[in-house]
Amino acid sequence: MLLGRYWSRALKQPVSRPDVVEMYDVTARDPRLLAQLKAHRNTVQVPRHWCYKRKYLQGKRGIEKPPFDLPDFIKKTGIMEMRASLQDKEETKTLKAKMRERARPKLGKIDIDYQKLHDAFFKWQTKPRMTIHGDLYYEGKEFETRLREKKPGDLSEELRTALGMPVGPGSQKVPPPWLIAQQRYGPPPSYPNLKIPGLNAPIPEGCAFGYHAGGWGKPPVDELGKPLYGDVFGHTASGHDDGEDQEVDRTMWGELESESEEESEEEEESSEGEKEAEAEAGGEGLATPLGLASVPGLETPDTIELRKNKFDTDLEGGDTPSLYQVLPERRVGLAPGLMASTHVYDINAANPGKRSTATAGAVSADGGGVEVALDPSELELEPEAVAARYERQMREQRPAPKDDLSDMLHDHVARQKNKRKRQQNTDSKQAKKYKEFKF
């Protein structure tokens, strides 16, 4: 079995990515297929704790878990201060109050303004940090230092202080202590494109090469004086155009045109078509006209109607229609009915055209109004007396109502009144008996 097993170095040779091959991959049934699958693009690795003998996450038992830290956009709402004040109030409560609140809890203790919540989640919300494809969690991952914010070549203030380098605005003019070794052995192989002043990039202004205090060493050049690792003297930097000042057309090529632009284009096309038609008509105008008849539909009519129809006149309307119209009030005699009125309104005044026909019909139906017989001696009476006599005569001529309910209503009201009196007397006698009772 051991004679046919692959060595790890032999297994890394036929694979495009030798870094994914582990020392225990040689024990697989098909090591070459396993190495090929692990080296394939977008392959997610098996979690590394598959070969551990202890249980998953058992090594974190002695580590204190920090409390969850709210995001900054939620802290701006002030919910932490509200919760702290509520906790202080709960500490001062008695045991009886705590038991009462546990049996009947109260809701709505924390009331946050709606505008603050809206701004927190729709204005200040930030996207949480998410892992990329294939980035699995393993034990102790949260304690690792994130190097995404760190850039190679940038020296922090702590490192400058430890190396004895100055800290402040002019600290970039002092070279690091490893610059002399880099000029002798070359740039770091892990960062071949890293720009290092004095090695493959020009030194800052006001600085000079040399081995004196604050000097930048000796520039790495060959026998002919050409730089070995880059433009250390800054000769080609001035002529280099990085394209930052060039104007780039950033309009969207697939954007829909607006309706106004389409209308303007159509108008331009129509105007061009009219100009072409006029040019063609001008060219044909030199020809001798033939004696052909014109189109029958374009002949001039014999008569033209200039008057407006009645329907068109009604639609147009001469004056502006009014919002309302005041109806005239007219005083009449006593009309029949339970709720009769002595005032009526002339509705026919709203339609002057129909008023004449309605008035004529009413006069013919009434037979000339009401006749009142007066003696010659009564002609000098006052108008009020004449009106009273007219109403009396109208009341005599009016037929008596068939069903008069006034007597029945009067009897019903009287019975109800007597019933209430008897009920009050009975209640007063009973109350008096209770008061006179004694032991």
Image (spheres, grey):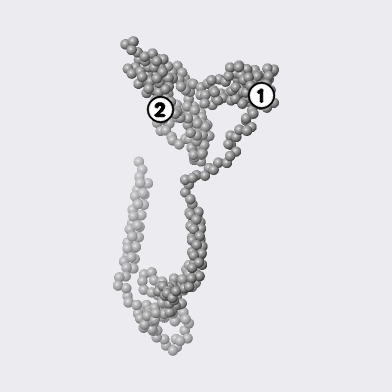
Mark 1: few, some, or many residues within 10 Å (few <14, many ≥20)?
some
Mark number, residue 173: 1
What percent of the width, then of the height, locates residue 129?
47, 30
In this rendered view, identify the residue nearer to me: 324 or 215.
Answer: 215
Can residue 392 be seen from the camera position used here?
Answer: no
Q: Image point 34% across, 62% down: which residue?
A: 413
When asked about the image quadrant of residue 168, the answer is top right
> What kind of element bears circle 2?
loop
Q: Image point 52% across, 26% down: which residue?
A: 148
In this rendered view, identify the residue nearer to me: 153 or 2.
Answer: 2
What percent of the width, then of the height, locates residue 282?
51, 67
Seen in the picture, residue 257 relative to 166 is either above or below; the reply is: below
Q: From the image, tell me which residue sits under label 2.
A: 42
Which callout, 2 or 1, points at the residue further toward the start of the chain? 2
In the image, 47: left or right of 128? left
Circle 1: residue type: Lys
What percent of the width, then of the height, locates residue 266?
48, 57
What percent of the width, then of the height, locates residue 180?
62, 17
Can residue 26 be seen from the camera position used here?
Answer: yes
Badges 2 and 1: C-beta atoms under 8 Å apart?
A: no
